[in-house]
Image (cartoon, helix red, strand yellow):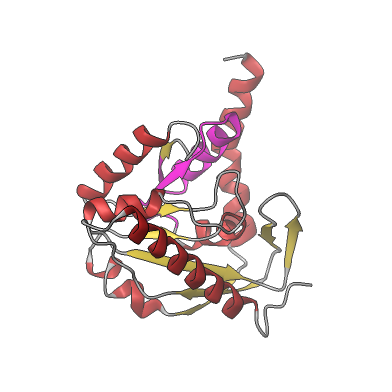
Amino acid sequence: MKTHHRIALGLAGSLGPVLFRGLYSTLRFEIDGAEHQKATWGAGEPVVFVTWHGRIVPLVYLYRGNGIVTLVSQHRDGEYLARVAKTLGYDAVRGSSTHGGFPALRELVRKLRVGRSLAITPDGPQGPREKVKPGALQAARMTGAPVIPVMAGTRRAWWFEGWDSFMVPKPFAKIRVAIGEPRRVPRDCSVRDLEEYAEALESQLQALKARVDQPTAQRP
């Protein structure tokens, strides 16, 4: 690793969380559906949280400090995210659906089986945008852990029009969070069944997105 890269990683790990906490300590959260996670995660059961890649930033702050395991790309940029996530109380498994997928899935399953909860963006790290890929559901199927969809929205945000339409809340923003009903994937479900679960989860995430974006969280 080159010297300038090591320096960048060090700064990301030390300054990133400070800036992150400073910016987002001003956020106000309004949560709908907290009872869905209270009955599972709140009772000590490991769960698989899922959200769209473009809506992850405020949720990273909201769920900080809980030892949740995240799936982070093996790309070099993913190393910056992994460093920041670690200092915010997350654990990171490196991999994606295209690079390091099977080893990453095995590690996610191992984490679930020892009682750790996961946070996965099923359309990440490179899309297609807001389309559920099977990794999160496979981990849930292999362990019996419930899948809990979560969505965040706000009308005060910067939007970065990449593949995921990435949302970065502005200081003092009010964040609306909607938590959906848990879904469990039977161990014996077929490939076709898994596709149907993915379609249902995708619809659920889109419904939650519509809820947090309407009417008071309209995108400017």
Q: Residue furthest top?
A: 2
Residue at screen point 42% across, 36% down: 101
Camera-side residue of 89 and 161: 161
Camera-side residue of 175 and 171: 175
Quadrant of the drawing holding the N terminus: top right
Q: Which residues are magenta?
A: 64-92
Quadrant of the drawing holding the C terminus: bottom right
Residue 46 placement, left or right of 82: left
> Residue 55's spot in the image, x, y percent?
59, 60
Indicate whether 42 appears above or below 64: below
Camera-side residue of 194 and 126: 194
Residue at screen point 67% across, 85% down: 215
Indicate whether 81 appears above or below 185: above
Q: Is residue 75 magenta?
A: yes
> Residue 71's spot in the image, x, y percent?
44, 44
Residue at screen point 29% across, 64% down: 146
Residue 35 placement, left or right of 202: left
Residue at screen point 31% across, 50% down: 139
Q: Is residue 199 magenta?
A: no
Residue 185 placement, left or right of 77: left
Indicate whether 64 appears above or below 215: above
